[in-house]
Amino acid sequence: MKATQDPPVHDVIIAGAGPVGLFLACELALANCSVLILEKAEQPNSPLKFLPFGIRGLSAPTIEALYRRGLLPELEVHKHLKNPHQNAQKGARRQAGHFAGIPFQEGDIDTSAWTHRLPGATDNSLISEMAELETVLTRRATSLGVTIKRGVAITGFHQTAEEVTVLSNDQSFTSKWLVGCDGSRSVVRKAGGFEFAGTEPEFTGYTAKVDLVDGEKLSPGRTMTATGMYLQSQPGYLLIQDFDGGAFHHSEMPLTQEHVQAVLRRVSNTDVTISALHMGTTWTDRARQATNYRKGRVLLAGDAAHIHSPLGGQGLNLGMGDAMNLGWKLAATIHNKAPEGLLDSYQTERHPIGAQVLDWSRAQVAIMRPNPAARALNAIMRDLINTRDGATYFAARVWGIFTHYHLGGDHPLTGHSVPNFEFEDGTTIGELMHDGRAILLDLGSNDSLKKLADVFGSPLNYITAKAKEQLGLSAVLIRPDGIIACAADNDPDHQVFQKAAARWFIPS
Ligand SMILES: Cc1cc2nc3c(=O)[nH]c(=O)nc-3n(C[C@H](O)[C@H](O)[C@H](O)COP(=O)(O)OP(=O)(O)OC[C@H]3O[C@@H](n4cnc5c(N)ncnc54)[C@H](O)[C@@H]3O)c2cc1C
């Protein structure tokens, strides 16, 4: 076995250069950690990562995370892309998203119900393309000094109290920490013996690009049938759900034109004919989550930590949230700057968010089942979603508007994402977070806060400024991931802020 020489020990090895591994690498490198990514694929960007298969909906926390690191302007695809939810007919109501295929309309959403939310850099949701996102993140990671080795599939690892040795066939690599971002079939998760608890699938999902001889035989739009659901989003682009208990996906049989046609005929109850299958993939609604995201010096993030059906498009967003939460905590741990329990808070904060997303996908499957009870529930849900309150609720859930952590504290904003304050000079809070540091925002020039910032030193960026719209706040302590650790409406209580700061940071 030959050992890698240069550098001998990285701070962190990340398994997988998917979006989550890449974004985590950026966060760690921004905080001065040395990072090596080992990626199984020789080449980035498989054809499935380009449009239309590579289409991904980004939710508010992901958009904010990219904005706060200055990455959002680098995403171009959404500027040229038609929102697939948008209705084609002129004057038609604009679909803003869906729950179990039931659309909610933009005009029904009451954004004024979302108090403490200031307009961000973009809408609350954004269409993106996996290939572009990974390209942007790869470029940033490389510019920050991250090493990416492609064509290296991790086959196992062993860890001691001080380090982790990562194995890839006849090679080995050593690091202080290993993070498995190696997707749903994670080798890190399996080799580490992480418990992966959850529920088994009810259907096989198909995404395929085909040539149809007689596509007009299919109904327009999303069509629920006696055995599943099908949708032809553009001519030849098919989405099918076949309630076979996930059998075909798990058989790992090759996807053939004959098979897709047979499934489409059965689900659509037509004799439609496919003359060519250009591309296709299958997936299921299996919903499982690692019960622990950490074992010693090994952590999991993204699909490696949780899997569920892509219904409602939340997996990527969930993983990006993991990376934003974990990066600064692991970096502080590596630099011996972590208060007790900081790294453990990755599990306590992110595991419940993951569990919520799994349940969100299960709830959708429950009302999509091809049986009378599910159809009855589906009809009731449709009525509710078509109300103003319903659309507002579903949009908030799908776009992650209320995603927050239970951090305790008296102020209602504690644990929530910081509103995007714009200051009198035109800069915004998001633009001030590009360096990945925490911020102590003093909106009232308070001497005691300045002294507190001096005690904590450079990890805490003290900013005193006048916000254009203050939302009644006088001071806010913001973690590097943009989460509010402490806030005050009136004269900030020095002790409360000091306690909050000491919970997340070590005085320098
Ligand atoms: C049809 C479909 C539609 C979707 N739509 C949405 C959506 O709209 N919004 C959304 O948020 N999510 C969506 N998702 C989910 C989203 O794509 C995933 O959650 C996301 O890609 C997870 O990112 P990741 O980096 O954790 O894992 P992956 O993207 O799977 O990346 C893992 C990486 O690890 C590498 N790897 C694997 N094994 C090893 C190994 N042994 N050694 C080294 N490297 C390894 C892989 O090659 C890969 O590059 C969708 C998924 C599907 C299937």
Image: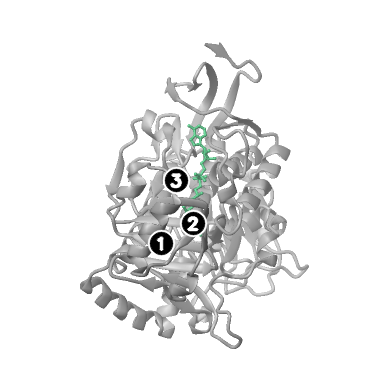
- Residue linked to disc 1: 240
Q: Residue at x 63, y 39 (%)?
A: 31
Q: Nearer the viewer, mark 3 or mark 1?
A: 1
Mark 2 and mark 1 residues within 8 Å of each other at the beta carbon: yes
Q: Nearer the viewer, residue 490 or 251?
A: 251
For label 3, being within 8 Å of ligand 1 is answered yes
Gap in angstroms between the C-alphas marked 2 and 1: 9 Å
| Amino acid beneath label 1 | Ile
First in residue order: circle 3 vs circle 1: 1
Residue 77: quarter of image = bottom right
- Relative placement, left or right, of 475 versus 294 is right
Tell me if mark 1 has few (under 14), some (14-19) or many (20+) residues whose alpha carbon lies within 10 angstroms of its own.
many
| Amino acid beneath label 3 | Asp
Gap in angstroms between the C-alphas marked 3 and 1: 22 Å
| Amino acid beneath label 2 | Ala
Give residue 447's position: percent from left, percent from top.
Answer: 66, 58
User: Which numbered disc covers residue 208?
Assistant: 2
Against 291, is 109 above or below?
below
User: Which numbered disc covers residue 303?
Assistant: 3
